[in-house]
Amino acid sequence: MSSPGQDERQQKDERSPAVESYVRLKMLGMHLKAHGFTIHQVAGGLVVRNTTSTARTCCGARGVAGDTITCRPHDGDEGRYWYFTSWQQPIAETERITDALVMIKGYLGAPA
């Protein structure tokens, strides 16, 4: 007989990569929304916008900063799932949600 925690890990291991990425992006989206970002789930990614950005944009010093964040296994980290920017730069391992928030807030010009 298996324990409840073991059953959850087995189900998690059996998820397809697409489902695993979707679930992890959904989790990130909830945290980002709680921090004032607007989010929109799209096929394969999460569009994140900071409408109060202090980051430099093509239209001047202030504006809307945004990015489409993806989630996939990181080749350099034994296949663990990581969040990535739209230009394929790693943000943070998905298990490190606070680190991901700090990085995203930083490059999208959100206050700390």
Image (cartoon, rainbow, N blue to C red):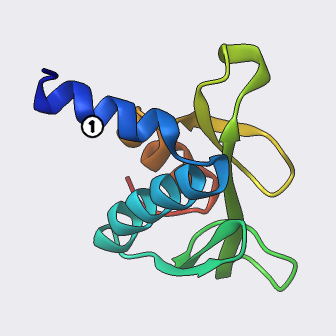
* Amino acid type for the residue under numbered disc 1: Glu
Q: Position of residue 66 (x, y in %)?
A: 68, 73
Q: Is residue 62 visible?
A: no
Front position in the image: 47 or 45: 45
What residue is at 83 percent from the left and 45 percent from the top?
88
From the image, tell me which residue sits under label 1.
8
Q: In the shown orientation, is residue 104 left or right of residue 3?
A: right
Q: Position of residue 52 (x, y in %)?
A: 50, 81
Question: Secondary structure beneath disc 1?
Answer: helix
Q: Position of residue 98 (x, y in %)?
A: 36, 40
The image quarter containing residue 29 is: bottom left
What residue is at 51 percent from the left and 79 percent from the top?
39
The image quarter containing residue 19 is: bottom right
Check the image and name the residue furthest to the front. 1
6 vs 91: above or below: above
The image quarter containing residue 59 is: bottom right
51 vs 103: above or below: below
7 vs 22: above or below: above
Within 10 Å of disc 1 (Cα), the crowding (few <14, some 14-19, many 20+) is few
Q: Position of residue 49 (x, y in %)?
A: 59, 77
Front position in the image: 63 or 50: 50
90 vs 105: above or below: above
Front position in the image: 24 or 40: 24
What residue is at 59 percent from the left and 25 percent from the top?
80
